[in-house]
Amino acid sequence: MKFNTKTIHGGQDNVDPAYGSVMPPIYQTTTYSQSSPGEHQGYEYSRSANPTRTALEKSLASLENGEYGLAFGSGLAAIDAVLKLFKPGDEIISTNDLYGGSYRLFTKIFEGLGIKFKFVGMQAAEDIEQHINEKTKLIWVETPTNPMMNIIDIEAVSKVAKQHELLLAVDNTFATPYLQRPLELGADIVMHSATKYLGGHSDVVMGGLVVKDKELASKLYFIQNASGAICGPQDSFLVLRGIKTLHIRMQRHCENGRAIAGFLKSHDKVKDVYWPGFEEHPNHEIAKRQMSGFGGMISFNTKENTLESARKIVEKLKVFTLAESLGGVESLAGHPASMTHASIPKEEREKTGVVDSLIRLSVGIEDEEDLIEDLRQAIG
């Protein structure tokens, strides 16, 4: 199947065997009848497995060209499951420009449990090697990164990981499998905050993992069941429904993103625009190679370079909504320093460019002229 067909049919049975339902039903149940102790129809308790969640997990695996999908109650719950593969004394190398919630989980929870994290720039894959030692077990990558839109060469990092027998995990939330499929580039684990583009309608919180290796999948399924941070059947249904329009939504996100990035770049009150579609963007050529488009996520800062200048803009927006999160059909604006990345110390976030004047846009699928006019009146 081509990707656009996979969003609708990938990994799915055409009809539900019970009554012929075209959409997977919401199995709102905790437990299942058994004909004899241990004899059942594949389901016994919904923490372990639920038919609606199974349908979603099969869809996730199909989209990423993986073999095994796992759905969780949030993106952070999915990351938490990955980190539980490791033990005290193990080390993980992470990109230094990443979602604040990931940083918080790494440093405030798992560092306290004895896992060490090294946060490094990954614009050049060879720079990672100097941080690897016998305790290193995992390389954690976001690309494009949040919120600076840095591009990391997944294929090059995967070669480093394989050379040193490390696992490579890629947060693919910003790109989605519509634009980028990390498993095809050598990653071992793909993570999604399905809250964002996969759900696509700002009405569900969920996370997902996709892997190819059976042994790795078995370990993660065990953690999923043992820790219990699963998503419910209603949320599974909502993300399944969202995935069916992922391809057409992402096409419009990309089209609008290009238009908005061009407008901001030409504005005399805007200093820097971070969008991987610009030829001068660092690693633009890598983005062209590993992505099929450049997405609808854009960050920019003002020429005044002050918190007050950013606050004035986001408070004036009318079509864009000032809110956390991203990836919905509606356009959102955020102020990373005080919102999504507030958990990262100021001196650390400013090293990667997350200054007080930075504004992050999640460009939705509205009419591009309305979005540009809204930014024009807000920036002034």
Image: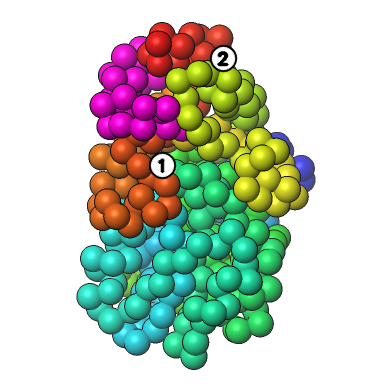
Say which amino acid is labelled 1.
Thr
What is the x, y in percent for residue 89? 34, 87
Say which amino acid is labelled 2.
Glu
Residue 368's label in the rendered image is 2
What is the x, y in percent for residue 373? 48, 9
Q: Quarter holding the N terminus?
A: top right
Question: In the image as oriented, which residue stretches furthest toward the bottom?
Answer: 134
What is the x, y in percent for residue 178? 64, 42
Highlighted magenta segment, given as a residue range: 300-322
Task: Please name the residue shown 28% across and 81% down the image.
Answer: 114
Spatial distance from mark 1 to mark 2, Cα to Cα? 24 Å
Dividing the picture into quarters, in which one does residue 26 lie? top left
Task: Label 2, secondary structure: give it.
Answer: helix
Pointer 1: what residue? 195
Q: Is residue 227 left or right of residue 197?
A: left
337, 244: nearer the viewer? 337
Q: Is residue 318 magenta?
A: yes
Mark 1 is surrounded, within 10 Å at the Cα level, by few (under 14), some (14 to 19) or many (20 or more) other residues, namely many
Q: Earlier in the sequence, mark 1 or mark 2?
A: 1
Q: Is residue 222 left or right of residue 266?
A: left
Task: Please name the residue shown 64% across and 75% down the image.
Answer: 160
